[in-house]
Amino acid sequence: MSLLQRLSKLPRELHSFKNVVQRCPRRHESFMSTSRQSSTLKTVLKASLVGISIGFPVGIVITSGYNWYVSKQTSKRFHLQGKEERIQVLQEKPTVPISRKIVFPVDTSDLKLTLYQYQTCPFCCKVRVFLDYFGISYDIVEVDPVLRKEISWSPYKKVPILLAETESGYQPLNDSSMIISLLSSHLKDKSQKIDELVDYYPSIAMLDDNQKFKNEIMNKYFLMYKGSTFPDKDMEEIMQERKWRQWADDVFVHTLSPNVYRTLNEAYKTFNWFSDVGKWAEYFPTWERLIMINVGATAMWLVAKRLKKRHQLKEDVRMSFYDEINKWLSAIKKRGGRFMGGERPNLADLAVYGILKSIEGCDAFKDALENTKLGTWYDAMMREVETHSGGKYLIAK
């Protein structure tokens, strides 16, 4: 039935409704006369009918208008689908103060890197764990997670952003998995320059499952080698590493927020730990830090409820968290080594360790240590990362 037909029938339906209401028996109240009750009822009824007659078509018009606007915006951007976007090189480094420097005497990489991050963001932790494991020095800029003014220079509004100084300028690298794959490719063959490797990880515009546009980085779990052979791994190892790196991003990381923000009290404890470990009192004024803690904790407690439903976690979200940890540990046991990479960590080990590192001070992490066998693998990973043992495997070329 068309909109005009439905609107034409509305007065008749409202008139019928009015007749029904008028026939209903009225109660006698001691403080109000029957005539006054009747007058008041008629006034209320008339106001209600006017409200309905105006609100119903207005609601239809607004809804239709909104749907038209969304459709129009989608159609305007439809031509962008499949378009490639390259991360532009900066000719000057952003004038943002460095929060702190991480310097490793064992560093032989010759890389000059600045990491724009939140200290406890799991994706930022992944990048830091990778750099620490290989003993690569870097500068850190701590970003305000609410105002984000430290990355106002970047069209990419998420963290981490890794800024690499190259011969052509300052090359921004976005997305933790892409950053790790690109740097791994460079470290394995230093003749492959960072600003050249970027071309192998294009950002492509596409529609997601909700018909919203997003830029997806292609090949972000792939290492780039010259030639057709892989110098230090067989194909099975490479496929397993990719599989578990993607699992870490697509599945495991999504169990974190519903667990660390499970209750409002846990959310506040988590954000206070974020403040301590991220040294917010040192880097941000008091008013800004209080906004970050109070707004952040409340917002994430509310968001966590939606995330629980979206990612189909169990009613007790701890159980989903333990399930994924046990799945990871079982896969390591099946492979027969201390790590997913065998006797030394691979990129999947570093990714999962980095994600867990981001909640090390939270109740959820402590509960996981008590209710799973996570501790053995986690402690072994900690020793590998803190001794920068990956540096000895780098072969300069």
Image (tube, grey):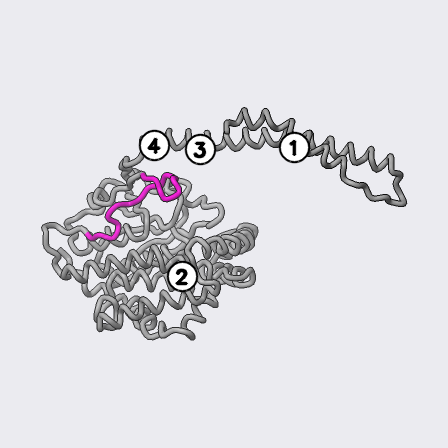
Mark 1 or mark 3: whose residue is earlier in sequence = 1
Spot occupied by residue 120 in the image (x, y as percentages of width and height): 42, 58
The type of residue carrying mark 2 is: Ser
Mark 1 and mark 3: Cα distance apart in space? 27 Å
Instruction: Please tell me which residue lies in front, 16 or 266.
Output: 16
Q: Residues within 10 Å of mark 3 (few under 14, many from 20)?
A: few
The type of residue carrying mark 1 is: Ile
What's the magenta bit mostly, secondary-structure-wise?
loop
Give me the disc on residue 78. Answer: 4
Q: Quadrant of the C terminus?
A: bottom left
Which of the 4 image quadrants contains residue 350? bottom left
Mark 4 or mark 2: whose residue is earlier in sequence = 4
The type of residue carrying mark 3 is: Val
Which span is picked out in magenta? Answer: 206-223
The type of residue carrying mark 4 is: Phe
Mark 2 or mark 1: whose residue is earlier in sequence = 1
Q: Nearer the viewer, mark 3 or mark 2?
A: 3
Q: Residues within 10 Å of mark 1 (few under 14, many from 20)?
A: some
Identify the residue shown where x is 43% and y is 50%: 143
Q: Is residue 59 left or right of residue 16?
A: left
Mark 3 and mark 2: Cα distance apart in space? 37 Å
Spot occupied by residue 300 in the image (x, y as percentages of width and height): 50, 54
Residues at discs 2 and 1 in contact (Cβ within 8 Å): no
